[in-house]
Amino acid sequence: MKTSPKDFFLHLAVIASLYTIAVSFINLAWRIIDYVFPSGNFYGYYERTLSAPVATLIVVFPIFIILYWLLNREYQKIPEKRNLWIRKWLVYITLFLSGIVIVVDLIVVLISFLGGELLTVGFVLKALAVFIVALAIFGYYIVDLRGQTTSKINKISAWASGLIILILIISGFSILGSPRTQRLLRIDEQKIGDLQNIQWQVVNFWQNKGEVPKTLADLSDPISGFIAPRDPQSGEAYGYRVLSAPLTFELCANFNLESRPVYRGTASPDIRGFDLPKPITPQDSWNHPAGNHCFERTIDPELYPHTKR
């Protein structure tokens, strides 16, 4: 039977949306597993990494269901379309890829186990998520190729997969919070970024002039174009005060929400996950409660020596 453009693009769209759902499902499952079972020294700020798979599943899964329903309606009208070359090629490619994923997934788990590595709960759950998704796709298309799929099986598959995806999306939203929460988090991240910028300008000021600035206005440099940033919400200057201890100062800001720790221990990464320059003190951290909070900083002259002119 001749393949029409409609048949070609309908089959292609179904498989493309299936791949997109599978990748997004695994991505979202992995991010949730990382959040629940943080590994090593990494806690992670998962809002950005969760947003993409959640949004993709919300949009693409209903499209996939509609497309698959249209495709099955075509099969019911013209059963010969099940033998179209485009369908057979796409089904066998899908079987091939899902089979490879299953084998590689098992090999990775066995290599880790035989190599004496500690199989953490997070690692096992990630491997299990990949295995289940690949096995579900592989099993369904094996049954489909044998002509054993029925409308009842299709409905059960659609409802089961839809329920699992819904649970995963709800779990993602429980971590993400509402859009308003996300906006407040972004604003707090911007405030942390501003304070970090000010902090390193203070360090630079000390290295060049041998003293810390008395006010943030002292950091203004018309040549470099630096002007101390202001709070993006209130428009007011950030809090800054020189303390009595040598080379000790504090930076203050009013935060909307309590921060989530990014790393365990005493490292001082940026709240967005990027590594910062060397910490000023081992206690250097940007974790904060909701409301006004000050960060005390002490410049180590051995790490950041004054450049005598």
Image (tube, grey):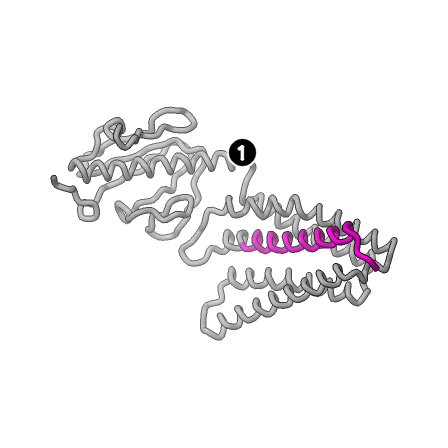
Residue 94, quarter of the rendered image: bottom right
Q: Residue furthest bottom?
A: 114
Q: Residue at x 38, y 45 (%)?
A: 270
Q: Residue at x 60, y 46 (%)?
A: 54
Q: In the image, is residue 227 above or below residue 129?
A: above
Residue 39, quarter of the rendered image: bottom left
Q: Residue furthest right?
A: 77
Task: Inspect the magenta stretch and tell me whether residue 22 lies in it.
Answer: yes
Residue highlighted by disc 1: 180
Q: Nearer the viewer, residue 187 or 297?
A: 187
**Residue 184 placement, left or right of 296:** right
Q: Nearer the viewer, residue 10 or 214?
A: 10
Task: Inspect the magenta stretch and tell me whether residue 309 lies in it.
Answer: no
Mark 1 Cα shell of 10 Å, populated few (<14), some (14-19), many (≥20) = few
**Residue 270 placement, left or right of 221:** right
Q: Position of residue 156 (x, y in %)?
A: 77, 55
Q: Position of residue 44 (x, y in %)?
A: 45, 49
In the rendered image, the quadrant that contains the C terminus is: top left
Magenta range is 1-30
Which secondary structure class fits the magenta region best? Answer: helix
Please, what is the three-letter code of the amino acid marked with disc 1? Arg
Q: Nearer the viewer, residue 178 or 216?
A: 216
Q: Residue at x 46, y 46 (%)?
A: 45
Q: Secondary structure at mark 1?
A: helix
Q: In the image, is residue 236 above or below residue 100?
A: above
Q: In the image, is residue 248 above or below residue 216?
A: below
